[in-house]
Amino acid sequence: MDQNETPVLTALAEHQKVDRYGFTPPAHRQGRGVDPRVLEVLGEQTFKSDVLASSGLDDRTTSHGYLQRAQDLMADAVGADMTFFSTCGSSLAVKAAILAVTHGEGEILIGRDAHKSVVSALVLGGLQPRWIRPSWDNELKLAHPPTPREVEAMWEKYPDASAALIVSPTPYGTCADIEAIAKICHDRGKPLIIDEAWGAQLPFHSDTPPGRCPPVRMSAS
């Protein structure tokens, strides 16, 4: 695939050339009538690009495939089978992944250093968390992700859990041994969710550790 393509950006540029007046949200109408003081700080382009996927763009009934093409390009760039863009950042993706693999019931193994979006998913699904202890680094005074041994021990203790979730890299920048943890989970026929919100840069530079943090965005495999 040609990674120089910009499907969404190109569609927005073409949409602006047409200069349609939309009768949909947001109410600022692509900057028409915005307070000049706001325009001075944020610029007109901020509002011109704040549009819904309609009126010639890419909604469900008149799709031109811009969004799908962009998602396919992203999947190709990071080595994933499929990519879904989230409208609310990785927090929504975490919730969606958890609810998808648990069906909103039972237990799930979770690294105790998980993001607060994980707790929101637990509340939404009525799930029982089984916390996996992170690895404490007494020298650096920070927590590393759980080790494969700790994950395996938790599966032995809670074999009926629906899935496992690990944060990697952590906000401190350290990575889990995803390959080993994934094998432990998959050998049991269980999905592994990786919250890699802190590692968006990992697939795109040779000095990052792809062997320990594979080039996968939020995924449930």
Image: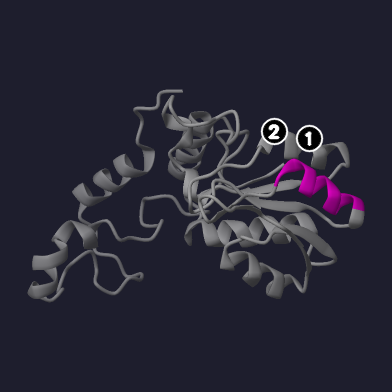
Q: Are marks 1 and 2 in contact (CB under 8 Å)?
A: yes
Label 2: element kind: helix
> Disc 2 marks which amino acid?
Glu
Q: State yes or no: residue 153 in magenta.
A: yes
Q: Which residues are magenta?
A: 147-156
| Of 132 and 117, the residue lying toward us | 132
Q: Quadrant of residue 42?
A: bottom left
Q: Which residue is mark 2?
A: 179
Q: Quadrant of residue 112?
A: bottom right
Q: Can residue 160 be seen in this snapshot?
A: no
At 30% from the left edge and 61% from the top edge, which residue is drawn? Answer: 50
- In the visual, does 181 lie left or right of 205? right
- Tally of numbered tags: 2
Residue 155 visible: yes
* 200 displayed left or right of 47: right
Q: How is the image coloured?
A: one colour
Q: Is residue 121 above or below residue 177?
A: below
Location of mark 1 (residue): 183
Residue 91, given in percent of the width and then of the height, sits at: 54, 61
Cα separation, mark 1 vs mark 2, equals: 6 Å
Q: Secondary structure at mark 1?
A: helix
Depth check, front residue: 148 or 195:
148
Badge 1 local density, few (<14 within 10 Å), some, or many (20+)?
A: some
Q: Which mark is residue 57?
A: none
